[in-house]
Amino acid sequence: MAVLVTGGAGFIGSHTSIELLEKGEEIVILDNFCNSKPDMIDKIKKISGKDYKFYEVDLLDKDGIEKIFKENEIESVVHFAGLKAVGESVQKPLEYYHNNITGTLNLLDIMKKYNCKRIVFSSSATVYGSPKTVPIKEDFPLSTTNPYGSTKLMIERILNDLYISDNNFSIALLRYFNPIGAHKSGEIGEDPNGIPNNLMPYINQVAIGKLECLNVFGDDYDTPDGTGVRDYIHVVDLAKGHLKALEKIRKFKGIEAYNLGTGNGYSVLELVHAFENATGVKVNYKITARRPGDIATCYADPTKAKEELGWVATKGIKEMCEDSWRFTKNKGL
């Protein structure tokens, strides 16, 4: 019996795959490498010391998904695969809706056909839109400010409707805040194709000299220093949250949403300065216009995950910066 990890070669997927393998789980990884690299497949094996099956498949290829279910006994799915950049989603909404929603519908259709009824879904704090207050709790009103967030919210609604139609499903919706950091080995971390959309790899590429300057999108938000405030969580803490969610859905039928965050907010400039302090490397930056779809402040109340999953983020901002920089230097990005 295996766990299918869609998008398992990506940033969060690869770290979660390692945690699953190290815990003794049998896994099958599906990825199309649209925002990951083929060498990740061997790196996961090297770090974990375990082997697993891999399929280069796109979730838009329904026959490709079915082949995996035919050839393996899949008992649960951890679903990461999807396009994930807020700014790009504003520029390419149709691509985001088609890829993220159609791909998930294909996956769910095959899961139903093969009687696989457990799924951990990689959702996002973007489903809270622009919250009126912080910290954010799971029962806050849901809305979105960009197409990427809208795809996550739509998939959450699809999964809710799926559970209503069939109460044998067990579903965990994991609403991530902002994952950063890297594996302690320095072997894997966030390594996007092209210019980074996320802040930490952008900071790293400026620090190592690959990019000249960090663009800080807006300094006129209603925050202490005018730059956007986010809840940054170490990717390994986040990965461990998926294992806790998997334990949960194996014991209970139902659908539940959980915030995965630290409960602390840091501004863009605070993260830049934390990185400089942790690494001793200066980061050049300039203030530019706000990015469409961004909000001022977003950080979690992670109480529910602690109480129901037994999960707590343990790594601080200094460790996140140090691990991320170790990976960047190791790779020579």
Image (cartoon, rainbow, N blue to C red):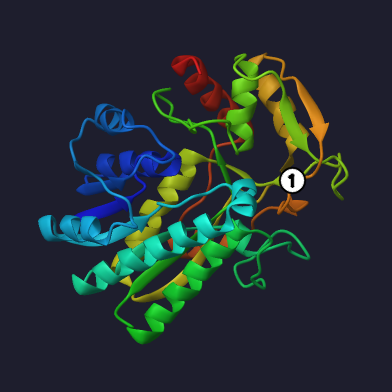
Query: Quadrant of the rendered structure where residue 303 is?
Result: bottom right
Mark 1 highlights which residue?
291
Left or right placement of residue 318 versus residue 235 in this view: right
Residue drawn at the location 38% of the way across and 79% of the way down: 162
Q: Where does the image place residue 148, in percent across and percent down from the top left?
A: 57, 56
Q: Is residue 333 left or right of residue 67?
A: right
Name the residue located 43 percent from the left edge and 22 percent from the top edge.
186
Between 269 and 286, the residue placed more toward the observer is: 286
Q: Which residue occupies the extreme left position in the image?
A: 71
In the depicted view, which residue is nearer to us: 184 or 2? 2
Is the residue 288 above or below the residue 166 in the image?
above
Which percent across, then down, holds residue 241?
Answer: 44, 52
Kindly tell me whether residue 304 is visible in this rendering. no
* Residue sitting at x 70%, y 33%: 271
The image shows residue 43, relative to residue 333, as above or below, that is below
The secondary element bearing badge 1 is classed as loop
Residue 152 screen position, x and y as percent? 52, 62
Q: Is residue 329 left or right of residue 243?
A: right
Q: Is residue 149 visible?
A: yes
208 relative position to 105: left or right: right
